[in-house]
Image (cartoon, helix red, strand yellow):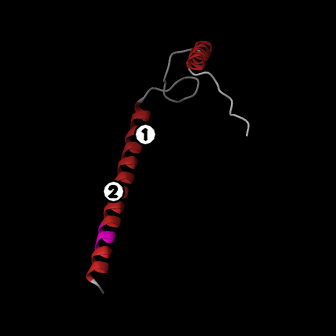
Amino acid sequence: MSPLLQEGLNVTAIGMGVVFVLLALLVGIIRGMSVISQKIEQMMPASPETGGPTTSSLSQQELHGVISAAITAHRERRPFRPPEAQ
């Protein structure tokens, strides 16, 4: 086997090894964050309507108003442009 081919295989093996280790580390970090978030969610008080954690004290009407205002502000800032006909 030529030295150039051997060096290419070495670089390939090192590169694939580094990528595998980093991806495995990323999977571990994401799983750890999931466990932490589940523990935090269990510690939060339950909401009477949904049984889940309370996230806001807004009523449905207030929430609807806030969302409508945000949509209106966005549309005023960036008007809709229909796609051009082909």
Residue 25's disc number: none
Label 2–label 1 contact, CB within 8 A:
no
In terms of depth relative to the viewer, which is nearer, 80 or 41? Answer: 80
Name which residue lies at 28% across and 73% down.
10
Residue position for label 1: 38
Residue position for label 2: 22
Quarter assignment of residue 63: top right
Q: What segment is highlighted magenta in the picture?
A: 10-14
Amino acid type, callout 1: Gln
Q: Quadrant of the C terminus?
A: top right
Residue 24 position within the rendered picture, expressed as x and y whole percent measured from the top left:
36, 58
In terms of depth relative to the viewer, which is nearer, 10 or 29? Answer: 10
In terms of depth relative to the viewer, which is nearer, 53 or 33? Answer: 33
Q: Quadrant of the N terminus?
A: bottom left
The answer to whether residue 37 is left or right of residue 9 is right
Q: Please, what secondary structure does the residue beneath circle 1 have?
A: helix
- Magenta stretch, main secondary structure, is helix
Quarter assignment of residue 16: bottom left
Amino acid type, callout 2: Leu
Above or below — where is 63 with respect to 50? above
Q: Please, what secondary structure does the residue beneath circle 2 have?
A: helix
Q: Is residue 60 within the magenta segment?
A: no
Name which residue lies at 70% across and 34% down.
84
Q: Mark 2: give few (<14), some (14-19) or many (20+) Cα within 10 Å.
A: few
